[in-house]
Amino acid sequence: MKATSTVQVDNDRVIVTEWRMEPGADTGHHVHAHDYIVVPLTTGVLRLEEPGGGAREVALQAGASYARPAGVAHNTINAGDQEFRFVEVELK
C-alpha cells in the first residue's frame, strides 16, 4: 500500500506536501533533492529503510518538527496501527 501525497504549495522557493499513511503504507524508496523539514500532524512510529539494508524505527510526536539535508535516501513506512500524517517542506 502506498502513502498518498498532496502538494499544497510549489513555487520558486519551497514545495509543501501533506502526506497521509495508513498502517503499513510506504512512500517508496526515494532520495531527497532538497533540504527539508517534516512537521508531524499526528503521533506515531515510522520505520525507515535505508541504503545497504539497514532499518530503524523512529517515534514522532505531533508538532515536533525536524530538519534533514538534501541527499537523504530511504523508504518510509508507517509502523503504527493508526493513520500517520505529516507536512513536508522542501527548501529550493
Image (cartoon, rainbow, N blue to C red):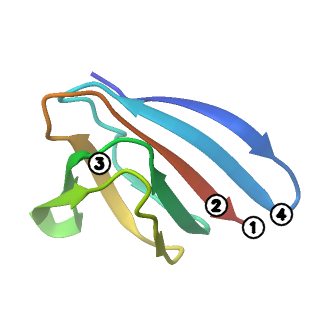
Gap in angstroms between the C-alphas marked 1 and 3? 22 Å
Q: Residues within 10 Å of mark 2 (few under 14, many from 20)?
A: many
Type of amino acid under label 2: Glu
Type of amino acid under label 3: Thr
Determine the image quadrant of residue 31.
bottom left
Q: Residues within 10 Å of mark 4 (few under 14, many from 20)?
A: few
Type of amino acid under label 4: Arg
Provide the residue designation for mark 3. 76
Observer-nearest residue: 50 or 65? 65
Provide the residue designation for mark 4. 13
Comes first in the chain, label 2 or label 3: 3
Residues at circles 1 and 2 in contact by the CB criterion of under 8 Å: yes
Comes first in the chain, label 1 or label 3: 3
Provide the residue designation for mark 2. 90
Gap in angstroms between the C-alphas marked 2 and 3? 16 Å
Provide the residue designation for mark 1. 92
**Which residue: 29% across, 48% down?**
76
